[in-house]
Image (cartoon, grey):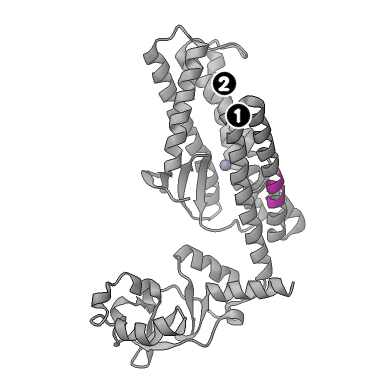
Amino acid sequence: MQAQIKLGRIFGIEIGLHYSWLIVALLITLSLSGHFKSTNPQWSDSVVWFSALVTAFLFFVTIVIHELSHSLVARMHGLTVRSITLFALGGVSQIERDSPNARTEFWIGIAGPLASAVIGSMCLGVALSLAWRPAATPTDPATAVLVWLGYINLLLAGFNMIPGFPLDGGRVLRSILWWITGVRSRATRLAAQVGEFVSYVFIVIGLMRFFSGAGLGGLWISFIGWFLLDASRASQAQAGVAEALKGLVVGDVMSRDYVTVDGRSNIQTFADEHLLRSGRRCFIVMENGKVTGLITPHEVRHIPHSQWPYKTLDVVMRPLDQLRTVAIDTPVMKALEIKGREDVNQLPVIVNGALEGIISRSHILQLLQTKAELDR
Ligand SMILES: [Zn+2]
């Protein structure tokens, strides 16, 4: 989930919005104004709209606090948190790595719902001190805002504790299974399977409500279920990959058969003789018998065709010193992680400063495919 609108940083963590959030913010403000108008017809229009806007804004703040509590606990355990993005269905924290152990996973997962439960209880507590009584309709704007925020945050805490991965409750379940079985990928798979089941329940309930006349609210529940289904399947696939690649190191799967090109030749020659002929995507650039960088279609793509005869490879390549490299004994899972983080498809394998081979994403995929075919 990429943020399209950046709001700034809190504790060094970037907070951003995905466009889909704006639509939901608008829907929430509209439905809140409708709610306030019907519960308090004596309020003037400006009071209704002002209360709705303030409530929607504070709701947004409480979701950020929910995500921040996941992030800060992750950081306390030494994990790097890049950003928090709010989108139509809530927030996501981009945490750089997976938890190193079950205990960390447990605390990261439960921190958010705990924060929401505390915020919800505090809002209702303050409302009570302002003479509001449970089940009564709050009549002044301040109490009305507090009561709505109180209930919605308790609801959020409850919803997030549903034990289907990747919901928070699913993370907690996964951490407990991880603790019991001692195997992370198996725990992830089980928790994600529960997540898949929960998703189907959501989709069915949503559709039933929709067809019994609940309108868009029903479809909304189905939509959440569909989104969850997608996420839990992705988690299962990821766990499967982790299981299949367990114990393998870069040296086992890397390719030693790579093609080198001269850094002083121009792009036109390179394209004619290699790129558009061999079907390979990654080439090693050498100069004076030394590896200086790596070149793929990605680097060539941005150069206008007219300049191809005049630009040499050493100008457009990815220089070796700017490339992430891996050692021969790096676990394959770790190499995949680095590829994802750096957004590259190939990593050079360096031994004692010299190039030993290349490990590419397509290589790993082929290996996985073969393993799946042979059921090994
Ligand atoms: Zn959460």
Q: Quadrant of residue 157?
A: top right
Q: In terms of image quadrants, where is residue 56?
A: top left
- Which span is picked out in magenta? 192-197
x and y percentages locating residue 334 in the rendered image: 56, 69
Name the residue rendered at 39%, 74% in the picture: 297
Where in the figure is residue 350, as x and y percent of width and height?
Answer: 48, 82
Q: Which is more N-terminal, label 1 or label 2?
A: 2
Quadrant of the picture in which ligand 1 is shown: top right
Asked if the magenta segment contains residue 300, the reply would be no
Determine crowd level at label 1: few under 14, some 14-19, many 20+ residues with C-alpha closer than 10 A: many
| Residue type, numbered disc 2 | Leu
Residue 364 x %, y %: 58, 74
Marking on residue 154: 1
User: Label 1 amino acid?
Assistant: Leu
Q: CA distance from mark 2 to mark 1?
A: 10 Å
The quarter in which the C terminus is drawn is bottom right
Q: Which of the two marks, 2 or 1, is nearer to us in this view?
A: 1
Q: Main secondary structure of the magenta part?
A: helix
Which residue is found at the position 58% from the left and 57% from the top? 98
Residue reaching furthest top? 42
Residue 76 lies, with reference to residue 116, above or below; the image says: below
Residue 124: which disc? Answer: 2
Position of 305 compared to 298: left or right? left
Q: Secondary structure at mark 2?
A: helix
Which image quadrant for residue 155?
Answer: top right
